[in-house]
Image: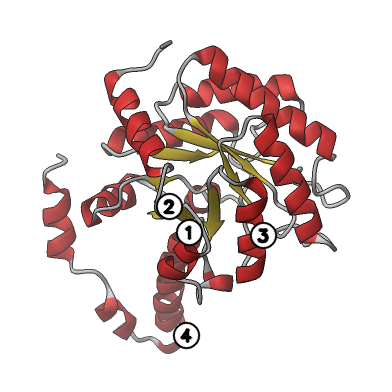
Amino acid sequence: MQNAGSAQLGALERFWTLHESGCFVLPNPWDMGTALYLQHLGFEALATTSAGFAFTRGRPDGAVPRDEMLGHIREIVAATTIPVNADFLAGFSDDPAGVAANVALCIATGVAGLSIEDSTGRSEEPLFAQELAVDRVKAAREAIDAFGVPVVLTGRCEAFLVRHAEPMRVVLARLVAYAEAGADCLYAPGVSEPDDIAAIVGAVAPKPVNVLVSGFNSHLNVSQLADLGVRRISVGSGLALAAWGAFIRAADEIVTDGKFQSLSDGAPFADLNARFASNT
């Protein structure tokens, strides 16, 4: 296998096993420290978050250049010993050939999986036309096969996130097409109704489905999603937003009230210091 070390091969094997049965949570760290802590808690795999990382750079989601994102993904992979799935946005290219070239660069970071979405980032045309979107997934599949490292390819339909007028119609049609184009796992971030989730699972079966849980649908739980047939649960920028929420509330209290009471809710310094001592 081209450029695949033993660590990546081991992570790939574990990641594929997780997708075979049951339901697992794939939390999303945004830096080395959060990745290490999530591994410490016992999570079996991680996924990067494009938004969570972008906010650490003072940029909006989608505004981090490709090479900077690749460096971040490589850093998260190197920090832990468990499989890492890359939130690779739209592949940093509109055309299939560009997606293929960039997917090869992403595989070389040591990831066990990566996702390609169909969002253009343009308000006048928020989703790539379906034929082009399918060709982009095919290009990613071909790049993975040519590289010879069988990372898990996730095909994402962003119809819910771009507020399409008929999101389920678009999601079902596209996810089925992405599965046929070679996606190993299917994902429609933004879906929240149990009936819709069950319909997605049924439409692409037996391929596994990822569901995003964040603030908008935090009423869902692991047991409920497992019963619906969901194989993988991610939280996207949810953990990063939770951390930002605590930071903003504490900072606002200082500037508005001249008080520091929110700081008493922080994580114990000694605990974190001890947790990370072994990494020096």
Q: Is residue 237 left or right of residue 166?
A: left
Residue 264, quarter of the rendered image: bottom left
Of all residues, the one furthest to the right in this rendering is 124
Q: Nearer the viewer, residue 41 or 137?
A: 137
Q: Earlier in the sequence, mark 3 or mark 2?
A: 2
Badge 4 crowding class, 10 Å Cα cut-off, few under 14, some 14 to 19, many 20 or more, is: few
Q: Residue at x 53, y 51 (%)?
A: 210
Describe the colour scheme in one phrase: secondary structure
Residue type, mark 2 in image: Asn
Name the kind of residue labelled 1 in the image.
Answer: Val
Of helix, strand and loop, which one carries label 2?
Answer: loop
Which residue is the site of mark 1? Answer: 235
Q: Is residue 271 left or right of residue 205?
A: left
Q: Earlier in the sequence, mark 1 or mark 2?
A: 2
Of the numbered discs in the image, which one, if any, rests on residue 28? Answer: 2
Query: Quarter of the image holding residue 207?
Result: top right
Circle on res. 256: 4
Image quadrant where one finds the N terminus: top left
Residue at disc 1, secondary structure: loop
Q: Is residue 74 visible?
A: yes
How far across and how far down the image is residue 245, in percent?
46, 72
- Quick check: marks 3 and 2 in contact, CB under 8 Å? no
Answer with mark 4 or mark 1, whichever residue precedes in sequence: 1
Disc 2 crowd rating (10 Å Cα; few below 14, some 14-19, many 20+) is: many
